[in-house]
Image: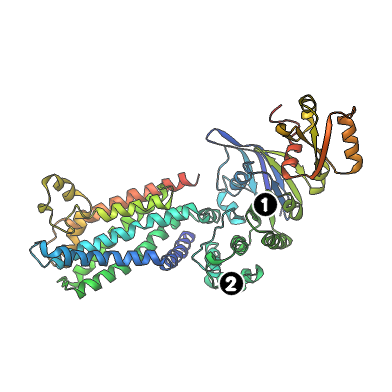
Amino acid sequence: MPDTVTHALTLTGRGIRLSRRNVDAVITALALPVMLMLIFVYFFGGAIDTGTAYVTYVVPGVLLLCAGFGSSTTAVRVSEDMKEGIVDRFRSMDVGATPILAAHVAASTARNLLSTALVLGVAFLIGFRPSASAAGWLAALGVLLAFVLAVSWLSAAVGLLARTPEAASGFTFLMMFLPYPSSAFVPIDTMPSWLHGFADHQPVTPVIESLRGLLLDQPVGTAPALALAWCAGILAVAAGLSGALFRVRTR
Amino acid sequence: MTRHPAIEATGLRKTYDDVPVLDGIDLRVEPGTVHALLGPNGAGKTTTVRILATLTRADAGTARVAGYDVVTERARVRRALSLTGQFAAVDAMQTGEENLRMMARLTGLSRTAAARRADELLERFGLGDARSRLAGTYSGGMRRRLDLAAGLVGDPEVVFLDEPTTGLDPRSRRELWQVVAEVAARGATILLTTQYLEEADRLADRIGVLNAGRLVAEGTADELKTRVAGHRLDLVLADRAAYRRLAPHAVHEAPETLTLGIPTDGTAAHVRALLDELDPARTDITRFTLHSATLDDVFLALTAKEPAHA
């Protein structure tokens, strides 16, 4: 359907313009991950022994934290749209749920590409020296992209579920904290044993293991396959769920 | 081409959480005319518009817009209509020009055609100077004009305006009226909802009066005026007995001050006749005042046959 594509592209342009002009959100989305990285590397890093330079260990974790947080702001955007009259106008112009939500996800992806580049730039400045080949870089970015897409769609579903943008912003907190009980910042075997079950099997862990392994050119085993499977699963559920939620919200 | 009504609805019903909002609405709007749905908050105006604009489904009844069924031919209906709602449906963080270009692209215009259409509408709606400013910085009236312009990018056959001037100051309201009249003059069919008698009077060829989910009157402004008294005579009664005796004639009751409001055309002859008829002994009515009828009086007069509390 060429209409759907035009609609999605037009609305993606809108999403990027709106993102760019939301200065507070841009600053938060860019500054927060960088601040966290500096805090981890310089405040906590000296006390954490991961067997490598801590900056090398933690950068993939910060990239993921940044992507998770950045993607989860999609919930707020979607929720704002649903609250205003603009979605009714789009619907009355026969613009479907898919292009509306896909445009939010695409704008979120664009935002995340930017913040990922910035975090990587700062990481290089403070001594992050990955040893990945070009293929490793591509694979790592691919996994990160899959994660951004999955969390953004899930976030769009949350935005449809939340009654207010304030409620929707609660999801960003979940995504801010989910990386902590994983191998993002410290190795899981240093955590209490009751946390291992969750930390080993939650979706963030295979994503982070893939990123780290691919960027540092270490063996990754099944982590990338597991990460992509998680992302595909989340994506499928989120897309189905958001379609249904959109119909309910606009009844 | 066969001429079909621009809007045709039969027996529309809608219930939200067991509360009936529309209780059997029939509507017929001829092409190229302006039709107003006049009613207080909660009368069902917005629900009617949302059903006709395919955003909400009726529980019962059928509706056709531009000749197409709003349920089974939804996509075709959507291509023929535009909706401007009570809440400005433009992005505050995009400029006027960006908003219009985006809407034009969504109706399927090419990039250059969309830019041209946006230029044209910005000029036509007096927003040329404000085109590069964020819509969030616009005044209420400018925002509403932008919103209306956004609805017109696709050159719709049928234009729905849901309370287009609610919340505007008198001057902006007048400016918007001019714009609406101009849109109508170009041949679009307009269905507008309003709480303001004056607005319906100024803009509409025909007016439907909606109350509690029903159309209680329908006709031209002049037809309705002959059915609705233009003034209200407020009578202060001497005692409770007189109050109770005359209450059935009233469209407005204030028992604490023993005051009753009776519709009248405001002429001396009618007021004199009313006083004589209601109080032949000239003992029950102690004082009176005369007001221009408010919209409330109009509704009460129109629904007087079935008073809510007998």
In the drawing, what numbered circle is on residue A13?
none
Residue under label 1: B192
Q: Secondary structure at mark 2?
A: helix
Q: Chain of mark 2?
A: B
Question: Which sits in the foreground, A201 or A29?
Answer: A29
Inspect the image, locate mark 2, and give the three-letter code of the amino acid beneath it. Answer: Ala
Count how many numbered circles sit on residues in the image: 2
Q: Residues within 10 Å of mark 2 (few under 14, many from 20)?
A: some
Residue B246, picture quadrant: top right
Q: Amino acid at mark 1?
A: Leu
Quarter where residue B23 is shown: top right
Q: Is residue A6 above or below residue A193?
A: below
The answer to whether residue B256 is above or below residue A105 is above
Q: Name the quadrant containing residue B174.
A: bottom right
User: Can you give x and y, in whole percent of width and height, for residue B180 in the image?
Assistant: 69, 60
Q: In this orientation, does residue B151 appear?
A: yes
Badge 1 or badge 2: first in the primary sequence: 2
Nearest to the observer: residue A119 or residue B10:
A119
Q: Answer with left or right where residue B51 lies relative to residue A223.
A: right
Question: Measured from the top left, where is residue A219 in percent x and y?
Answer: 11, 62
Identify the residue shown where x is 42% and y is 57%.
A77
The chain ID associated with circle 1 is: B
Residue B178 rendering spot, x and y as whole percentages: 72, 62
The relative height of residue B35 versus residue B301 in the rendered view (above or below) is: below
Q: CA distance from mark 1 to mark 2?
A: 27 Å
From this viewpoint, which residue is outermost toward the left?
A: A51
* Rendered residue at 61%/73% (across/down): B128
Residue under the image location 30 percent in, 53 percent down:
A173
Q: Which mark, residue B130?
A: 2
Return the residue nearer the eye: A108 or A99.
A108
